[in-house]
Image (cartoon, coloured by chain):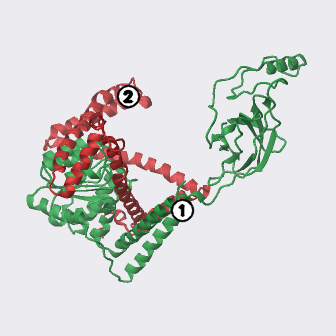
C-alpha cells in the first residue's frame, strides 16, 4: 500500500497533465492548472528541507572541527547574514536600494562572474586537446572548427573579402552551421524527444517505480 | 477591456487620449442648453483612433468591411469569441480605418464598448466573455468620412472544446508511439528477448565505480542542475539508484551534491534504496547526499571544491547541464578522474565529448536505466522508441520529397499549434 499510493498518484496526475495538453475543457484544464500551481507550493516546502540539510551537514563538521571546517563556517555565517538581512528588509528585500541587493550585486555577482569567466580558459584548454589531428575524422573536425571560428570574427571577413561571393569564410562558416551542424543537432533532438516520451510513459505507467520504493529495496 | 489582436495590425495602437471633437463640443452645448447633458464639458475619451466628423464636402462615410462575423474561438476553454472580417482595401475612399466594437447580451443592447481595432488586422479575439452565455456585437466602421451605420453580429455563445484540433498531429504521433510501446511490452511479457545494442558509456559506469574502489577514492555523481520537473533529472535519479547499488556492493563512498531541495530528497531515497537492494543498509551514509545551493555557479564552485579536495576517482555527470558543464569536466580531467557524462542538452554535448572519457548522447541518457536493469518491461519502451525513430526517418524523407515536388500539405499537417 505504501508503494501503491505514490504510483497511483503519479499515474493519475501524469494522465491528467497529459490530457491537459490536448483538452482545453475546464474539466481537465482546471485540475491541470491546480497541479501546476501545486508544484510551486511543494517546492517552497522543500526549500526548508534543503536549508536544514545545509545547516546540519556543515554544522556537524564545524562542531567537530572536521576537514575544511573554516570553509563550512564561512558558508553558514554567510547564509545566516544574507537570510537575516533579507528578513529585516521585509518583502521588498530585492529592491535596488536594499542592503540585500547591495550584497548580492557586490559580493555574489562578482564571484558568479569569476566562475563564468573561468569557462573561457577551460574552453581554450579543452580545444587544445580536442583539435589534435590523429586521423581523418579528427582532421575534418579541426578544419571545420577553424573555418567556423575564423569565419565568425572580423579577421575572417578581412582574409576572404577578395574571394568570390558565396565562398567567403563567413559564408562557409554559416553554411556549416546551418546545414551539417543543424542536421546532426536535429537528429539528436528527435532521438532525445523520443527518449523523453519513453521515460515519461515509463513513469506514468509505473514501469519505472524506483522513486516509489521508499526504504523498501526492490 | 481590450480585444486581443490575432492578425497583423496596419495601424499603430495609440494610447494617448484625443481632444474632444468640435462636433462633440457643439453637440454638448446644444444638449446642455436643453438640460439633457451634464453641466460639464465632455472629457477626452481614451479612444486610440478617433474618427473626424463627416463633412459633406470631403470623404464619404466608411463602409463596414465584408465578411464580418463572430464565432466561438476554437480550441479554448469557452471564454473567448472571435470576430473576423475581410481587411478593407486601403486605396478605397470608403475603406474603414478602424472598427469600434461593442458587446451586449441582446440584439438591441445595451452595448458596452469593448475596444476599437485597426481595420487591417482582419480578426480579433474577445477573451473576457463568460462560458455558455449568449453575446451580440455591434460593430461600427470609422474612417476619414466619419462613422458607418453599425452592424449587429450574433448570437454567439462561447463554448469549451474537448480537444485542441490544432494538436491532432501530436496526438496521432503519441497514440502510435504508445501503441508500439504497449506491443513490445506485451511481447516482452510473453518471454520474447529484446535486443538492445551495447552502449559503451553505460558499461563504463560500472568500470568507473570499480576503478574508484581500487584507488580507495569516492565516486562523485552529479544529477544535473535542473529541478525535478526536467525529465533528464528524473532519468538521472533512476540511474543513481543503480550506481548506488554498485557502490554499496563494492563498499565505495559516493558523493551526490544536489542543487534543488526536491532533487535532494529524491536523491537521498534513491541512494538509500540502492544500498538496501545491495543488502548493505548499514553502509548507507546520510551525508553522502547533500543539498548545496540552487545558484548555478555557486553550485559549480562547490562541486569544484569537492573534486579538488576529495579527489573522486570517478565523476558521473548525468542530467541537464548548461554553461557549467565544461568547468566541471575540465576540473575533473585535471584530477585524472574517469569521467562519464550524459545529457540531452545538445549545446553541452561537444564540451562533454571533449573533456570526458565517455558521453551518453541524448536518448542514451534516457535508455540508461532500462539498459542497466535489463528488465524486459523497461527494454520494451526502448524498442518502441527505436521503431518510432524509423517512422520519423520515413516521415522526414517523405516530407523532403513532397516539399521538393511542391506538395506542401504534408509538411503543413505536422505544424503544431
Closer to the eye: label 2 or 1:
1
From the viewer's perspective, tell me whether residue A133 is left or right of residue B145. Answer: left
Relative vertical location of residue A41 with respect to residue B383 in this rendering, above or below: above
Quadrant in which the N terminus of chain A is drawn? bottom left
Q: Position of residue B232 (x, y in %)?
A: 35, 56
Q: Residue at x 34, y 72 (%)?
A: B379
Q: Residue furthest right?
A: B34
From the viewer's perspective, tell me whether residue B86 is left or right of residue B168. Answer: right
From the viewer's perspective, tell me whether residue B360 is left or right of residue B185. Answer: left
Letter of the chain shown red in the rendering: A
Letter of the chain shown green in the rendering: B
Relative vertical location of residue B80 with respect to residue B244 in this rendering, above or below: above
Q: Which mark is residue B254?
A: none
Q: Residue at x 35, y 43 (%)?
A: A171
Mark 2 residue element: helix
Q: Which residue is mark 1?
A: B410
Q: Position of residue B240 (x, y in %)?
A: 27, 60
Q: CA distance from mark 2 to mark 1?
A: 61 Å
Of residues B14 and B268, the one drawn nearer to the viewer in this rendering: B14
Badge 1 density bin: few <14, some 14–19, many ≥20, Cα 10 Å: some
Q: Which residue is mark 2?
A: A88
Q: Position of residue B397 (x, y in %)?
A: 44, 65
Relative vertical location of residue B400 with respect to residue B176 in this rendering, above or below: above
- On the question of residue B255 being in view, the answer is no
User: Do the residues at discs 2 and 1 belong to one chain?
Assistant: no
Relative vertical location of residue B133 with respect to residue B146 in this rendering, above or below: below
- On the question of residue A24 being in view, the answer is yes
Q: Position of residue B256 (x, y in %)?
A: 24, 53
Amino acid at each position: 500500500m505504501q508503494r501503491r499510493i505514490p504510483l497511483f498518484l503519479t499515474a493519475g496526475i501524469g494522465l491528467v497533465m497529459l490530457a491537459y495538453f490536448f483538452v482545453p475543457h475546464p474539466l481537465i484544464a482546471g485540475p491541470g492548472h491546480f497541479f501546476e500551481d501545486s508544484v510551486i507550493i511543494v517546492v517552497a516546502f522543500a526549500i526548508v528541507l534543503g536549508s536544514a540539510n545545509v545547516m546540519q551537514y556543515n554544522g556537524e563538521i564545524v562542531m567537530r572541527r572536521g576537514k575544511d571546517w573554516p570553509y563550512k563556517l564561512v558558508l553558514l555565517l554567510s547564509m545566516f547574514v544574507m537570510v537575516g538581512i533579507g528578513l529585516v528588509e521585509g518583502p521588498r528585500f530585492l529592491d535596488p536600494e536594499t542592503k540585500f541587493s547591495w550584497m548580492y550585486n557586490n559580493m555574489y555577482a562578482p564571484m558568479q562572474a569569476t566562475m563564468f569567466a573561468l569557462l573561457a580558459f577551460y574552453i581554450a584548454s579543452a580545444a587544445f586537446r580536442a583539435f589534435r589531428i590523429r586521423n581523418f575524422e579528427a582532421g575534418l573536425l579541426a578544419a571545420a572548427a577553424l573555418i567556423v571560428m575564423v569565419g565568425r570574427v572580423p579577421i575572417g571577413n578581412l582574409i576572404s573579402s577578395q574571394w568570390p561571393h558565396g565562398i567567403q569564410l563567413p559564408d562557409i562558416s554559416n553554411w556549416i552551421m546551418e546545414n551539417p551542424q543543424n542536421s546532426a543537432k536535429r537528429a539528436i533532438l528527435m532521438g532525445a524527444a523520443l527518449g523523453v516520451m519513453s521515460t515519461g510513459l515509463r513513469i506514468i505507467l509505473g514501469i519505472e517505480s524506483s522513486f516509489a520504493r521508499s526504504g523498501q529495496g526492490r | 477591456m481590450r480585444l486581443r489582436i490575432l492578425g497583423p495590425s496596419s495601424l499603430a495602437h495609440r494610447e494617448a487620449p484625443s481632444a474632444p471633437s468640435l462636433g462633440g463640443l457643439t453637440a454638448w452645448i446644444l444638449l446642455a442648453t436643453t438640460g439633457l447633458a451634464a453641466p460639464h464639458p465632455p472629457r477626452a475619451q481614451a479612444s486610440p483612433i478617433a474618427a473626424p466628423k463627416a463633412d459633406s464636402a470631403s470623404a464619404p462615410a466608411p463602409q463596414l468591411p465584408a465578411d464580418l462575423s463572430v464565432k466561438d474561438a476554437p480550441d479554448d476553454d469557452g471564454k473567448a469569441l472571435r470576430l473576423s472580417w475581410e481587411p478593407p482595401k486601403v486605396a478605397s475612399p470608403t475603406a474603414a480605418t478602424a472598427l469600434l466594437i461593442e458587446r451586449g447580451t441582446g440584439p438591441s443592447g445595451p452595448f458596452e464598448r469593448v475596444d476599437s481595432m485597426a481595420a487591417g488586422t482582419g480578426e480579433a479575439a474577445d477573451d473576457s466573455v463568460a462560458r455558455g452565455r449568449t453575446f451580440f456585437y455591434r460593430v461600427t466602421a470609422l474612417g476619414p468620412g466619419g462613422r458607418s451605420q453599425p452592424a449587429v453580429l450574433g448570437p454567439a455563445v462561447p463554448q469549451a472544446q474537448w480537444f485542441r484540433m490544432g494538436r491532432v498531429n501530436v496526438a496521432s504521433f503519441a497514440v502510435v508511439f504508445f501503441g508500439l510501446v504497449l506491443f513490445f511490452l506485451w511481447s516482452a511479457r510473453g518471454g520474447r528477448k529484446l535486443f538492445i545494442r551495447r552502449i559503451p558509456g553505460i558499461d563504463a559506469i560500472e568500470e568507473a565505480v570499480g576503478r574508484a574502489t581500487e584507488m580507495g577514492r569516492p565516486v562523485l555523481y552529479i544529477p544535473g542542475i535542473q529541478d525535478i520537473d526536467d525529465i533528464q533529472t528524473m532519468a538521472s535519479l533512476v540511474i543513481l539508484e543503480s550506481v548506488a547499488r554498485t557502490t554499496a556492493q563494492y563498499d565505495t563512498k559516493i558523493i551526490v551534491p544536489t542543487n534543488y531541495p526536491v532533487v535532494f530528497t529524491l536523491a537521498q531515497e534513491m541512494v538509500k534504496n540502492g544500498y538496501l537492494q545491495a543488502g548493505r543498509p548499514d553502509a548507507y551514509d546520510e551525508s553522502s547526499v547533500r543539498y548545496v545551493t540552487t545558484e548555478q555557479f555557486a553550485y559549480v564552485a562547490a562541486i569544484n571544491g569537492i573534486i579538488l579536495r576529495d579527489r573522486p576517482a570517478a565523476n558521473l555527470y548525468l542530467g541537464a547541464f548548461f554553461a557549467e558543464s565544461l568547468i566541471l569536466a575540465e576540473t575533473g580531467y585535471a584530477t585524472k578522474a574517469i569521467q562519464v557524462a550524459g545529457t540531452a542538452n545538445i549545446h553541452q554535448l561537444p564540451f562533454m565529448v571533449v573533456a570526458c572519457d565517455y558521453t551518453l548522447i541524448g536518448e542514451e541518457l534516457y535508455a540508461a536505466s532500462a539498459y542497466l536493469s535489463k528488465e524486459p518491461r523497461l527494454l520494451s519502451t526502448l524498442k518502441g522508441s527505436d521503431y518510432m525513430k524509423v517512422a520519423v526517418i520515413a516521415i522526414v524523407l517523405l516530407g523532403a520529397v513532397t516539399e521538393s515536388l511542391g506538395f506542401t500539405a504534408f509538411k503543413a499537417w505536422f505544424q503544431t499549434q
